Amino acid sequence: MKRVKSLRNPLQRTAAALAACLGLILLAPWPGAQAVLHAALVLGIALDPESALLTALWAAAGGWAVEGTLRLYPHYGGTPWADMSVALLAWWMIRDLPVGSFKGWLGRQALLGALWILAVHLAVRLAAGPHLWGWTWAWILLGLPFWGWLTWRWQRPGGR
Amino acid sequence: MARRGSSWGWSRAGRRRWALTLLWLGHGVWALSGPRSGAAWSGFASVAARPAESAASAWRAWRLHRSERASNLEAAQGELAALRQQVQSLETARTVDAPKLADAEAAGQLLGLKEKLPLQAKAARVLLAPVGEPFGGLVLDAGADAGLVQDEGVIAPEGVVGRIWSVNATQSQVLPADAPNASIAVMLARSRATGVLQGLGSNQGEIRYLNNQEVVQPGEAVYTSGLDRVFPRGLLVGYVAEVRPGDLELQVKVALAAPLRRLPMVLILPPSSPLEAQAPLVPAQKNGGAP
């Protein structure tokens, strides 16, 4: 299969991931917007086709930022673990199963998004008990056109 | 799917794989360990943070105590300054009012005496009371304009003061009873013996023309006899201070009752005083009964 080479240099990736993490902290009063940005980070911005370790680190950083700002659980760690796991899956997909069209990308992001929501719920339940998202998860699905387009423009799968 | 060259050894790629694996597994283990481990870590963190927390608490308490103490000190200083100002204003007011109070007290005493005295006496303020003046000592603020004439009797609530020595338009001088050239007809309270009091100075006098046979005791009251037609009978003059037998007459020294140098106001008796003044005109006597 065709290998995807990153179009972003390390400085751009680091700056974007850092800005996303800061945005997660600043958007804490608005959980819906925070969830959309969180999805964009985990399923797009954090993905570095050349480094699985950096992908996992930035995804985990996003998870810790969200849990740290929410301060809702008796035990932290579920969200970063789920973020890391789904981000690694997305990393593998973007690296080894590239898609050539925006529609295909959106479909895959929808699938990964739903999987990510379930993973976060499961991991948080295992770590601290029932998740307290409420309907926040719906914002992720409703915001898919936005964060899907954003990650499409950022990653440009297929080398375009 | 292509497999990349996998090496789990001590190469760059191997180290990255190990780090990623440890990162993911560590998060998983940590998440799956549940709230209990979190509580343990929280407990450990709480214990570790105790010294810093206690130090911060002590520091906060010290700052609070210092600020409270400073505010209390400022309030106390402000209150003290206000009290000092108040005390100073009160002292100033008291100093200003002191002469008025003394005058009011003297006027009250004079008024009481005037009401008891069945005479048309006139009140006057003492302007000057020089010590050791043989002829005319006290200076009054009333003169011919008030109808005063020479040789009118002058009394105070405490006792006889003297007589008018000279009169001008607005002031007059009083010959005090202790002047060497002053004489007042007196009588002793117990023996009723009469004599003439002559001044010795220093608020004292001597009764002349008393027979050696008279029995006089120290402390006995001395009253005016009315024989000099200046003072009515029965006004207190003083008390016997010392009695010595003489060659021809008894030598009786009298301490005058009125403080002649410290009188703020006096009463001036009319020129033709009746012979008898109604009792009681005098305070309680040390020894001896009323005249």
Image: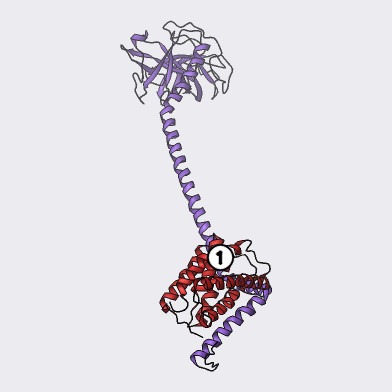
Chain colours: A red, B purple
Which residue reaches farthest left? Answer: B169
Q: On screen, A85 above or below B270?
A: below
How many numbered circles does the render carry? Answer: 1
* Quadrant assignment, res A42: bottom right
Q: Can I make out residue B247 in this image?
A: no
Q: Which of A95 and B176 is in front in this view?
A: A95
Under mark 1, the amino acid is: Ala
Q: Nearer the viewer, residue B124 or B50?
A: B50
Q: Can I make out residue A125 in this image?
A: yes
Q: Name the residue under label 1.
A: A35
Q: Position of residue B48 (x, y in %)?
A: 59, 73
Q: Which residue is drawn at 64% across and 64% down?
A: A132
Image quarter in which the N terminus of chain B is found: bottom right
Q: Nearer the viewer, residue A22 or B67?
A: A22
| Label 1 element class | helix
Q: Position of residue A43 (x, y in %)?
A: 53, 73
Q: Which of B43 and B51 is in front in this view?
A: B43
Q: Position of residue B24 (x, y in %)?
A: 59, 81
Q: On screen, A63 above or below B23?
A: above
Crowd band around label 1 with a 10 angstrom C-alpha radius: few (<14), some (14–19), many (20+) = many
Image quarter in which the C terminus of chain B is found: top right
Q: Which residue is drawn at 49% across and 51% down?
A: B71
Q: Where is residue A104 in the image (x, y as percent from the top left)?
A: 53, 73
Q: Residue at x 49, y 55 (%)?
A: B67
Q: Is residue A89 left or right of residue B85?
A: right
| Image mark 1: chain | A
